[in-house]
Every structure is written in C-alpha cells, then in structure tokens.
Amino acid sequence: MYVDSHAHLEGKRYAQDREAVLSRAREAGIEAMVAIGNGDGPADVDCGIRLAEQYSELPQVSAREHRKTFDEFRAGSEARSSLARSGSYPVIFATLGIHPHEAEMADEAAYARMEKLAGNPKVIAWGEIGLDYFYDHSPREVQQGAFIRQMQLARAAKLPIVIHCRPSDGADNAWEDCFRLIHEHWSSTGLGGVMHCFTGNVAQAKRALDLGFMISFAGNVTFPKAQQIRDAALEVPLDRMLIETDSPYLAPAPHRGQRNEPAYVTEVARRIGELRGLAAEEIGALTAQNFYRFFSLHEKVSSV
C-alpha cells in the first residue's frame, strides 16, 4: 500500500489519459493520493476538489480497521489496507491554495472564495503555499504577504498547511524567511503541516520537525546529485515521513525525463528503503499510516 501525498493532476499533460494514469496508480498499489489545488492561479484553486469529486469517494473505515491491517502487513501478511478502494482508481483527497508563483494574482475575492471552499469535505490541507526565491515570479514581499494571509485562513479553517520552499541558488534565504514566518504566524496553532518535496539539508529538516511538520520526499531523492536530500531522508524519523511524486514534475529514476505520474511513487519508496535498509513495501506502508494519522482521516471519513 502506498499514498502519493502530493500530485498535480489537473493540467493539460494529463488531458488525454488521466483515467489511465489513475488506473495505473491503482494497479501499482497506490491506494490514495492528494490532488493539489493550485492550478494556474486563484481562479483555479478548486481543481483538486473537482478531481477528488469526479474520481473517488471517501472510504468509510474505522481507525481500528486500518490499524489491524497495518499490523498484519508489518507481521508479514499480504493483507492490503481496508482503506484501499475496490474500484479502478485510488481515493483522492484535495488541497487548495495560491502558490507563491501566483501570489501577485491574489486579491480579496480569491481569499474569500478559498475561505468558502475550505469547508469541502474533500479538502484536507491548505497548500501548496510558501516562498519561491528561485524563480521570483512574484515579488518576494508579495509572496510573504500571501503566505501570511493563507496561514491565517488555514488557521480559521483548522487545516494543516503544505509548504513549498525554494531558495535562490546557493542560498538559504527562502528557508530562513519561511521558518521565521511559520514561527511567527503558524506554530501556535498546533496544526503543523507538510514540507513538500523536501530539498533542504539535515539541519533544515530538524527545524521543520521541531515546528511540527511532516517531511515529504519526492522523485528527486533518486537523482545522482541529490545527496543532500538523501542525507535528510536517512535522518528524518520514519514516523514523520511522507512520500510523493509532485506529478507531473520530478519523475524518479528510472523514469527521469518523462512525465511523472502517481504510480512512480513506488520508486521513491524503493530508494528511501535502500537508504534505511527496508523494503519499498514497508516504506509504503509506514508512510501511508503516517498520512492517515497526520491528516486525521479516520475521524474525517467517519463524519461524512
């Protein structure tokens, strides 16, 4: 069992074969995924919700049932999680948020619309949000303002946040600003979040963990020059780790250079397993359990 905790599946790159992509994911053992609700900007933040509503239904399962099947898996059973649907596609959850690239496009109407959409039962987090000083598509002060505003909205909605953080080349600037803003505007909520597609060093991973965040690793953990990411993947506690594809980006080896898709999250698990001396399937099971626990999905599905 695997969970792809972060994928962008709404774009044109999947327009011709989205159903086939989802079917391949299910066949590869991916039982759930998160459709990220950024789209092309504020007008498209419901894209993840639309996908989640179109292709899946929230499963009705108790925490006791999932704990039992997880324990059976750890004991060597071939039992699959009862959270895995019997249908053709994985269960799809959603987020919503304005990416730092489009921060300059945010206005009061966009914030008001997201505030309403946050109540949709498919939405489990606010994001991805944060800072990107590598491309600077929006001015840095504007990015910071949008980041703060969305943390305020996520606090009101009682949703964890999904963080995008990319510094400029050879610098820690975005990391330092991101940690500062989280400390000032988010830590007191106790809601935590996910450091998505983590590219920082071990010290930065520890700072994120201290702030209550999960660390999510993507396909770039397989890249030859990504030793810093592998060092972090070796140090992050297994109960604080998630895996993702960030599809359609960052396809892992041996698919590098191709369009990424959720089925390839198994390669992320495989590489982390090699680092930690565990089978890919066990990394998948551990990170799936982390996902359901962190997002309180047993409680969420029970209330639907």
Image (tube, grey):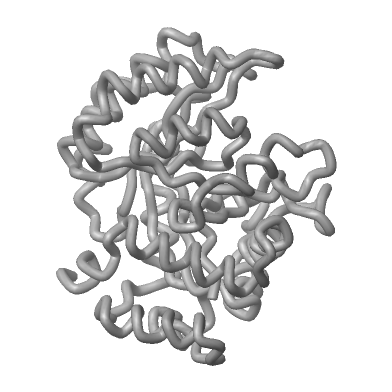
Image quadrant of residue 30? Answer: bottom right
Q: Quarter of the image for the N terminus: give it.
A: bottom right
Check the picture and name the quadrant holding the C terminus: bottom left
Viewer-nearest residue: 98 or 17: 98
Is residue 12 visible in this depiction of the protein? no
Say which of 304 and 297 sits in front: 297
Which quadrant of the figure has residue 261?
bottom right
Q: Residue at x 59, y 19 (%)?
A: 167
Q: Nearer the viewer, residue 172 or 47?
A: 172
Q: Is residue 259 visible?
A: yes
* 256 over 289 or under it: above or below: above
Q: Position of residue 10 (x, y in %)?
A: 53, 52
Please determine whether, in this image, residue 148 is positioned above or below residue 37: above
Count all numbered tags in the image, as a single digit.
0
Q: Position of residue 95 (x, y in %)?
A: 37, 48
Query: Which corner quadrant of the image does residue 34 belong to?
Result: bottom left
* Residue 118 rendering spot, x and y as whole percentages: 24, 46
Q: In the visual, does 300 lie left or right of 134?
A: left
Please indicate whether residue 100 sits to the left or right of residue 95 in the image: right
Residue 182, relative to residue 67: is it above or below?
above
The residue that appears at 42% across and 82% down in the rendered structure is 71
The one nearer the camera, 36 or 215, is 215
The residue sitting at 20% across, 50% down in the picture is 119
Which residue is located at x 43 percent, y 21 percent?
178
Left or right: where 163 falls relative to 57: right
